[in-house]
């Protein structure tokens, strides 16, 4: 254990930033300009609930406006505070730069426990908070575009978009004021699964590089790998589901609010999810072992550990007992800066948050572009693509008839080949491409420089470099 206090979340992000920036040759002052959060707006507003006026506190931090709009989610949680939103806003800046979405970084939060409120109460609260932010252009299609985060989802985004539209009746682009909306209210297919899907694509790309797999003391592919997931919320659920159902990974452990589940043979994620939906927790799940002190599962032996809930879960207090070979940060900031150092010394490879969970903002970018272009992806080209494929299939069919039994098309080829890509396929393809390219940009730095010991530092170097270039182009 290290003999020093745990930094706050924002300090942790700054420590990681400083470690990377020490290797860069930035003009004096620019380093500080990039590190600091540009502004944080705090609002306290009253809402009449259950016959009483309740005062709520909300924040929207804008970390960097080197590109606009700035982008980042809004979370509803009792843990929300200024330090947290500023840390998260900074991570958004670096995340957007790393995956090349043309946004600055921002983040917001409302200090409430959403489970304490009825739906109509949450709607009132959300509309009021939206009003406060929109009034100051902290929600605006060209300046600041929120999205879901912990405790918020499609429903809240639909309320926000509608509230903004009511306040800006002639803004033709009003739908682009938030992302993560339901598909029937200006959203895009594949946004709900996006962050978990991005974690899957990130791991698939990691396992395409045997040198990197070896660095984590692993071998082979994702097939059969033992995975422990902390948090089976939207991100953890989708990541675990796709990895187990499509890549053959075994989810041996799940850590949830009310306890954990452990099964060497692997847990069925859809069954566990349904059980949580029905009963509110993992307790009583018929297979596997129920673990009361779920946090102990973070220290259990596994190949891949996926912290997918909140920041700071791997810290000075438990880092030296973590036994995973590979940690992929599906949450923002799950590993504190001192814990990062301990894990590095132990030889554990970390796929950093700003890359690993960037699937959400990447698909948000697609949604924002869709809203601004006022047309669904694939609408113009799909049938044209199908018609061109039909031409080839017709030719192959002619060949088939001509050559007789010595040659034939594989079963199912025609159907698969003829189907033009719809919005969901296009979104997944764009996301896969983004995750592959971002991983490659990180690993290139990781392997080409002796002074870059890990992927996190490489990620910071790539993203800070891009932000710096953009500031320089503005003459700063
Ligand atoms: N809240 C998500 C994140 O932390 C998504 C942000 C967005 O889509 O703008 O990346």
Image (cartoon, rainbow, N blue to C red):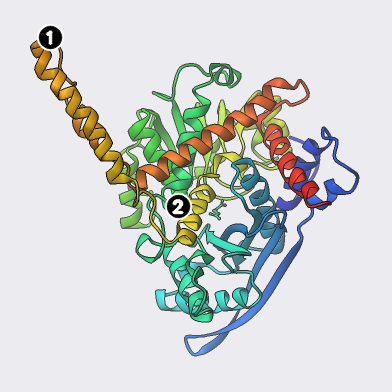
Q: In this rendering, which labeled residue sits more in front, label 2 or label 1? A: 1
Numbered-mark total: 2
Residue at far right of view: 28
For residue 258, the mark is 2
Q: Does residue 85 appear left or right of residue 258 in this picture?
A: right
**Residue 412 visible somewhere in the drawing:** no
State left or right for residue 62 relative to residue 430: right
Residue at far top of view: 406
Question: Is residue 25 or residue 155 the one in the foreground?
Answer: 25
- Where 422 sits versus 440, above or below? below
Q: Position of residue 251 (x, y in %)?
A: 40, 34
Vertical relation: 328 (above or below) 159: above
In the drawing, what numbered circle is on residue 406? 1
Quarter of the picture containing the N terminus is: top right
User: Which residue is found at the position 53% from the left and 17% from the top?
Assistant: 210
Residue that appears at 59% across and 28% down = 440
């Amino acid at each position: 254990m290290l003999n020093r206090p745990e930094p706050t979340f924002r300090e942790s992000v700054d420590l990681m930033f400083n470690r990377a920036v020490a290797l860069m040759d930035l003009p004096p002052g620019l380093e500080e300009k990039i590190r600091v959060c540009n502004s944080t707006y705090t609002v306290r507003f009253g809402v009449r609930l259950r016959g009483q006026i309740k005062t709520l506190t909300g924040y929207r931090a804008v970390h960097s406006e080197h590109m606009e709009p700035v982008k980042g989610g809004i979370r509803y949680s009792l843990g929300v505070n200024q330090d947290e939103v500023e840390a998260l806003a900074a991570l958004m800046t670096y995340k957007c730069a790393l995956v090349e979405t043309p946004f600055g970084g921002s983040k917001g939060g409302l200090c409430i426990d959403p489970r304490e409120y009825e739906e109509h109460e949450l709607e009132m609260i959300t509309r009021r908070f939206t009003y406060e932010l929109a009034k100051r252009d902290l929600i605006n299609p060209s300046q600041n575009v929120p999205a879901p985060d912990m405790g918020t989802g499609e429903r809240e985004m639909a309320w926000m978009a509608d509230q903004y539209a009511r306040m800006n009746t002639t803004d033709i682009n009003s739908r682009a004021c938030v992302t993560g909306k339901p598909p029937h209210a200006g959203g895009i297919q594949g946004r709900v699964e996006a962050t978990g899907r991005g974690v899957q694509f990130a791991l698939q790309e990691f396992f395409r590089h045997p040198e990197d797999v070896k660095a984590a003391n692993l071998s082979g592919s994702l097939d059969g790998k033992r995975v422990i997931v902390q948090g089976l919320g939207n991100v953890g659920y989708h990541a675990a589901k796709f990895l187990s159902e499509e890549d053959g990974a075994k989810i041996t452990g799940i850590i949830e609010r009310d306890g954990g589940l452990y099964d060497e043979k692997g847990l069925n994620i859809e069954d566990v999810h349904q059980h949580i939906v029905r009963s509110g927790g993992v307790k009583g799940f018929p297979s596997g072992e129920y673990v009361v002190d779920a946090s102990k599962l973070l220290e259990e032996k596994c190949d891949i550990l996926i912290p997918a809930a909140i920041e700071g879960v791997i810290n000075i207090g438990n880092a030296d007992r973590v036994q995973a070979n590979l940690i992929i940060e599906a949450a923002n900031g799950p590993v504190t800066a001192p814990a990062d150092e301990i894990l590095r010394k132990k030889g554990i490879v970390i796929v950093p948050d700003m890359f690993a969970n960037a699937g959400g903002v990447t698909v948000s970018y697609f949604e924002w572009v869709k809203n601004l272009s006022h047309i669904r992806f694939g609408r113009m080209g799909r049938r044209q693509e199908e018609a061109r494929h039909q031409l080839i299939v017709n030719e192959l069919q002619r060949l088939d008839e001509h050559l007789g039994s010595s040659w034939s098309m594989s079963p199912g080829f025609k159907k698969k080949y003829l189907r033009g890509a719809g919005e969901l396929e296009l979104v997944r393809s764009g996301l896969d491409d983004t995750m592959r390219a971002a991983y490659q940009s990180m690993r290139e730095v990781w392997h080409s420089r002796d002074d870059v010991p890990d992927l996190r530092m490489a990620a910071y170097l790539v993203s800070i470099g891009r932000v710096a270039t953009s500031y320089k182009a503005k003459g700063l």
